[in-house]
Image: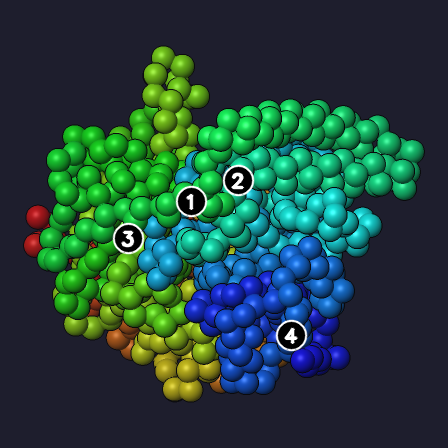
């Protein structure tokens, strides 16, 4: 079967699924992919002689999605070596993303892969971490808890070393990895293209390894690596797998020689060095295989050859899952069941007296049975022997919440719960807690006198299910959960949500858009500039289909009110007696601010024209002047882009307090820094909060005597 994509839009990626007797699971893989689908994708399914009706499951899923361009073919008998040829022959996109039929693609996988190819024109291969899941789909822990993101090329030893820094089920190829080399011989190398591809990618360009788990890797008795004897203890199986390993190494040497003989003279020494390393590795693996072969033959002659099956190794154990039944703080102390359970999950160190350390990344399953729980609060800390760093925390593969880990203190981050009833996740009624600390390190690497050689990420002191306690604006956990649940139906295009220039990141824009789309408002913007954030908020309001109130306040600075002081330019408003209320580097002023001030109508003129061009002006009320003089509409959401330093926070606090009154509001403050956040917390009663890039988001009220105490 073949259905062609629209000729108007080039195909960006081919999602290629090899299928062999995985009828119970192929539907879940397709569902997880279709939830991330884009119009510039195509699907390729290669059924390698299945006998269980898996191809019928594929056709049923495709019947419900006529919008998906798909090519489906079937081999009459299993011949795994033909899969590589099929991928290269039938895929039309420059990027081919492998998705094994017994696995699932976790949310965000496809976009994360394409982002690597977009950032790096030399990228030829992307692989990622993986989450082990049981045969029924229950998480069993992260595969690699130690290694961080990495980009490697021809001169890095990793691509040609046998190791566990990539997983075949996670690979995404630039099609040159197939096309720049001759077809593989099934007689020489019938298995293991996923172990050949990293070397090819290193010869041609770069290989990106992502530490974030993007694949749910299902563990079952019929896993391919089990069938070929990778985990067996039997002599015959070990010899068989070692022979496959030698064949793979021979193919890598053959590829490198082929490329050298057809490359320029300038590339000769580079490829020659790779060939030397590959040949040394081939000889080492040949020796290993020869010894195993002789051991097997000796055992056969002695009559002691163990007739064990290829896949005699037991499936991995599932770590313990703890229930949090009440909305209270659950300490992670050495002797608590919670600490003991977490210590059995990959990536957690042994529990200590009052906390437990993670490695660079961890994932653990919890059962949270608190009625109306909207978030999980984690009390976290960092190491005094390591630089201050950040952690990324998520629940059930939802959006990652960023938190800065203090070196000698604790902090609390609340992560919205994605309740375990998502049909796209194979586990139900459970919550997968994931923590990543990209800059984790061992203290001994920073302080030689400290003997701790463990890679330390985040210290967890307590977990606490959180319920919504207050009427008015929603708890941030509820807000983020709603945005996450609804965003799949919004059909937003990849990339920035507006063409107006400015300093909001893509992640910040998507969060603002989600708030504007799901909250009732009214909305206030403190500082519009030329409308990047304004247009994102207005678009969310427009797309929601409701007439929500949105006031955007912009003072409209004029050129004569700026003063050059050394290598800075200060803004001194006319009503401020010549006092500066903000400054930027002179180079930034001259390249990004002064050109706007000199245009017709200044800032307000550019802002108005930008919104008109996007047909968003009807959804905004522009207020020219200080935000404190804007009409008081009882705002529920405030985007604060005029208080970037502690001094600016203190200066704007009286006006902000007057607008908040006795209500709770959600505030998103841009250009976050720790000093500004500390000022907000000192001046206001900040409840739950989190950061996305430089956007500090919190639910807060004015301070009362009770909140001071």
For the point 19% across and 64% down, which residue is it?
373
Tell me if label 1 and label 2 are in contact, CB under 8 Å: yes
Instruction: Establish if 118 lies above or below 570.
Output: below
Foreground: disc 2 or disc 3: 2
The percent coordinates of residue 419 (x first, y second) are: 28, 66
370 vs 670, left or right, is left
Q: Which residue is tagged 3? A: 365
Q: Which residue is tagged 4? A: 72
Instruction: Establish if 540 lies above or below 279.
Output: below
Which of disc 2 and disc 1 is earlier in sequence?
2
Tell me if label 1 and label 3 are in contact, CB under 8 Å: no
Tell me if label 1 and label 4 are in contact, CB under 8 Å: no
Q: Which residue is tagged 1? A: 312
Foreground: disc 1 or disc 3: 1
Q: Residues within 10 Å of mark 1 (few under 14, many from 20)?
A: some
Dot 1 lies on which element? loop
Residue 237, label in figure: 2
For the point 36% across and 65% down, which residue is it?
426
For the point 34% across and 70% down, which residue is it?
422
Q: Residues within 10 Å of mark 2 (few under 14, many from 20)?
A: many
Q: Residues within 10 Å of mark 4 (few under 14, many from 20)?
A: some
Instruction: Establish if 382 lies above or below 563.
Output: above
Which of disc 4 and disc 2 is earlier in sequence?
4
Foreground: disc 1 or disc 4: 1
Dot 2 lies on which element? helix
Which of disc 4 and disc 3 is earlier in sequence?
4
The percent coordinates of residue 6 (x first, y second) are: 71, 81
| Residue 492 appears in the figure | no
Gap between marks 1 and 3, in whole Å?
Answer: 28 Å
For the point 54% across and 31% down, which residue is it?
300
């Amino acid at each position: 079967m073949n259905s062609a994509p629209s000729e108007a839009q080039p195909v960006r990626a081919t999602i290629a699924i090899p299928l062999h007797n995985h009828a119970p699971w192929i539907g879940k893989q397709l569902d997880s992919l279709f939830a991330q689908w884009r119009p510039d994708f195509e699907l390729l399914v290669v059924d390698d002689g299945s006998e269980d009706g898996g191809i019928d499951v594929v056709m049923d899923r495709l019947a419900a999605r006529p919008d998906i361009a798909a090519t489906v073919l079937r081999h009459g008998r299993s011949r795994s070596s033909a899969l590589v040829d099929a991928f290269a022959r039938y895929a039309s996109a420059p990027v081919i993303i492998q998705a094994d039929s017994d696995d699932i693609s976790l949310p965000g996988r496809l976009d994360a892969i394409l982002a690597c190819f977009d950032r790096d024109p030399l990228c030829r291969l992307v692989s990622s971490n993986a989450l082990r899941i049981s045969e029924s789909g229950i998480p069993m822990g992260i595969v690699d808890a130690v290694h961080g993101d990495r980009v490697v090329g021809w001169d890095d030893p990793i691509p040609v070393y046998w190791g566990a820094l990539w997983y075949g089920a996670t690979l995404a190829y630039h099609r040159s990895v197939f096309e720049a080399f001759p077809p593989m011989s099934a007689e020489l190398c019938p298995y293991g293209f996923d172990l050949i591809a990293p070397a090819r990618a290193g010869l041609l360009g770069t290989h990106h390894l992502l530490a974030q788990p993007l694949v749910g890797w299902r563990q079952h008795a019929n896993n391919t690596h089990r069938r070929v004897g990778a985990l067996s203890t039997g002599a015959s199986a070990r010899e068989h797998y070692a022979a496959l390993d030698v064949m793979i190494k021979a193919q890598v040497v053959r590829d490198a020689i082929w490329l050298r003989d057809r490359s320029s003279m300038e590339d000769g020494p580079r490829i020659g060095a790779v060939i030397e390393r590959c040949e040394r590795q081939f000889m080492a693996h040949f020796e290993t295989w020869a010894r195993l072969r002789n051991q097997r033959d000796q055992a056969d002659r002695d009559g002691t050859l163990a007739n064990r099956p290829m896949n005699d190794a037991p499936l991995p154990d599932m770590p313990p899952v703890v229930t949090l039944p009440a909305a209270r703080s659950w300490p992670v102390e050495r002797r608590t069941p919670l600490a003991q359970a977490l210590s059995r999950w990959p990536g957690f160190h042994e529990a200590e007296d009052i906390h437990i350390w993670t490695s660079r990344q961890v994932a653990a399953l919890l059962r949270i049975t608190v009625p109306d729980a909207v978030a999980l609060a984690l009390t976290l800390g960092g190491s005094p022997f390591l630089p201050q760093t950040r952690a990324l925390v998520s629940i059930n593969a939802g959006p990652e919440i960023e938190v800065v880990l203090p070196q000698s203190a604790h902090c609390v981050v609340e992560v919205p719960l994605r309740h375990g009833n998502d049909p796209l996740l194979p586990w139900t009624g459970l919550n997968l807690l994931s923590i990543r600390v990209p800059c984790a390190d061992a203290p001994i690497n920073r302080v030689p006198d400290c003997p701790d050689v463990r890679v330390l990420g985040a210290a967890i002191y307590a977990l606490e299910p959180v319920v919504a306690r207050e009427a008015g604006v929603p708890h941030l956990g509820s807000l983020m959960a709603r945005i996450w649940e609804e965003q799949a139906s919004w059909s937003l295009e990849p990339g920035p949500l507006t063409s107006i220039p400015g300093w909001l990141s893509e992640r910040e824009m998507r969060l603002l858009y989600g708030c504007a789309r799901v909250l009732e408002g009214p909305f206030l913007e403190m500082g519009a500039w030329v409308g990047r954030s304004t247009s994102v908020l207005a678009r969310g309001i427009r797309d929601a289909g409701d007439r929500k109130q949105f006031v955007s306040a912009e003072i409209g600075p004029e050129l004569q009110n700026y003063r050059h002081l050394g290598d800075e330019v200060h803004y001194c408003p006319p009503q401020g007696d010549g006092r500066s209320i903000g400054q930027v580097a002179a180079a930034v002023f001259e390249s990004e601010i002064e050109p706007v001030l000199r245009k017709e109508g200044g800032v307000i003129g550019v802002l108005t024209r930008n919104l008109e061009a996007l047909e968003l002006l009807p959804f905004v009320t522009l207020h020219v002047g200080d935000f404190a003089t804007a009409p008081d509409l009882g705002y529920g959401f405030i985007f604060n882009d005029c208080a970037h330093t502690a001094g600016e926070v203190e200066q704007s606090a009286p006006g902000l307090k007057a607008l908040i009154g006795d209500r709770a509001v959600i505030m998103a403050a841009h250009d976050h820094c720790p000093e500004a956040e500390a000022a907000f917390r000192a001046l206001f009663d900040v409840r739950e909060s989190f950061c996305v890039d430089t956007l500090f988001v919190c639910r807060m009220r004015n301070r009362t005597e009770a909140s001071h105490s």
